[in-house]
Image: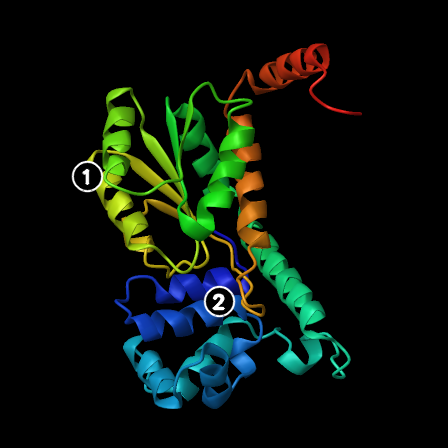
């Protein structure tokens, strides 16, 4: 298990039934894990977009007397952590909103790198994906692009990839058909705002006996309770529409881990390159 600040926080939250507001606080604490031990309850409330009493109730829900006790616990967990003023890049007001969005995504990628310090969850997910025949890849609405991108590349090395990027009454039928064909795993990309249809599809998939691996924006996303293995990649929220660099990169990391579990992956890629050259598919 990784000893990163984010991993330690997630371990602290495990086993607690949190309200949607409390999940939002937990999500933002994980995103700013290195800074949280030095934030006041008011600062954390502003960061998460909740009230200060909500932060206090959240701390009590975790078993602490109040937020000061929680913050002391976090400081004791990471005594060498640096305060936010020393860690954050200097901002003198010269960054415009587009630059700020880029810097926020860089922070999301740094957080992802911290999580990947423990490669075991991704490696386990890769092994699961490699063994499923067929392999289902689900992504609706905002997450459809992530699912399509993964399925496009996965099909180059995996013998049977089935993309589920359209909702409706046929979705459950396609899941059932894949199970009859031998599928054992469904990979889901889930991004906010989370469609109810995705939650329903995952519940159906698990009831049909599938193992669900999910790439989501947070370990506390609504899809978490329907996932056997959840890999978080935070999204940026500074622009009118969310940015998803971390989930996209996490999808590519999963592809790499899946290739490691497919002994003929390299041969398939080389075969594709030969055929692509013969057909003149690409302009070099």
Residue 89: name its quadrant.
Answer: bottom right
Q: Residues within 10 Å of mark 2 (few under 14, many from 20)?
A: many
Residue 48: name its quadrant.
Answer: bottom left
Residue 30 badge: 2
Q: Is residue 148 visible in this depiction of the protein?
A: yes
* Residue 238 image point, x, y percent: 58, 70
* Label 1 secondary element: helix
* Residue 169 image point, x, y percent: 23, 39
Q: Is residue 190 visible in this depiction of the protein?
A: no
| Quadrant of the image containing the C terminus | top right
Q: Residue tagged by mark 1?
A: 207
Image vertical order of residue 52 relative to residue 23, above or below: below
Q: CA distance from mark 2 to mark 1?
A: 30 Å
- For image coordinates 35% across by 80% down, the residue present is 59
Q: Residues within 10 Å of mark 1 (few under 14, many from 20)?
A: few
Image vertical order of residue 178 relative to residue 21, above or below: above
* Residue in the foreground of this view, choosing between 35 and 109: 109
User: Mark 1 and mark 2 in contact (Cβ < 8 Å)?
Assistant: no
* Residue 265 image point, x, y percent: 57, 20
Q: Earlier in the sequence, mark 2 or mark 1?
A: 2
The mark lying in front, picked from 2 and 1, is 1
* Residue in the foreground of this view, choosing between 140 and 10: 140
- For image coordinates 71% across by 10% down, the residue present is 278
* Label 2 secondary element: helix
Residue 80 badge: none
Image vertical order of residue 221 relative to residue 278, above or below: below
**In-image side of 42 versus 91 (left or right):** left
**In-image side of 128 versus 237 (left or right):** left
**In-image side of 252 versus 170 (left or right):** right
Q: How is the image coloured?
A: rainbow
């Amino acid at each position: 298990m990784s000893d990163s600040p984010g991993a330690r926080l997630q371990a602290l939250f495990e086993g607690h039934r949190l309200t949607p507001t409390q999940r939002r606080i937990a999500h933002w604490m994980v995103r700013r894990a290195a800074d949280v031990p030095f934030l006041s309850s008011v600062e954390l409330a502003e960061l998460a977009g909740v009230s200060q009493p909500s932060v206090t109730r959240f701390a009590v829900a975790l078993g602490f007397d109040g937020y000061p006790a929680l913050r002391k616990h976090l400081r004791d967990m990471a005594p060498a952590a640096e305060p936010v003023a020393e860690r954050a890049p200097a901002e003198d007001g010269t960054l415009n909103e587009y630059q700020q969005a880029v810097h926020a995504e860089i922070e999301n990628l740094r957080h992802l790198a911290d999580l990947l310090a423990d490669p075991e969850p991704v490696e386990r997910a890769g092994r699961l994906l490699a063994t499923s025949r067929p392999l289902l890849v689900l992504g609706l609405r905002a997450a459809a692009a992530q699912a399509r991108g993964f399925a496009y590349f996965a099909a180059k090395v995996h013998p049977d990839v089935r993309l589920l990027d359209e909702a409706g009454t046929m979705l459950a039928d396609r899941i059932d058909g894949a199970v009859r064909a031998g599928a054992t795993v469904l990979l889901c990309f889930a991004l906010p705002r989370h469609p109810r249809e995705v939650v329903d599809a995952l519940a159906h998939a698990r009831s049909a006996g599938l193992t669900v691996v999910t790439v989501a924006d947070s370990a506390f996303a609504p899809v978490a309770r329907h996932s056997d293995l959840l890999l978080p990649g935070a999204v940026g929220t500074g622009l009118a529409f969310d940015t998803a660099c971390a989930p996209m990169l996490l999808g590519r990391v999963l592809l790499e881990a899946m290739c490691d579990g497919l002994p003929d992956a390299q041969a398939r890629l080389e075969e594709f390159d030969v055929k692509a050259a013969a057909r003149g598919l690409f302009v070099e």
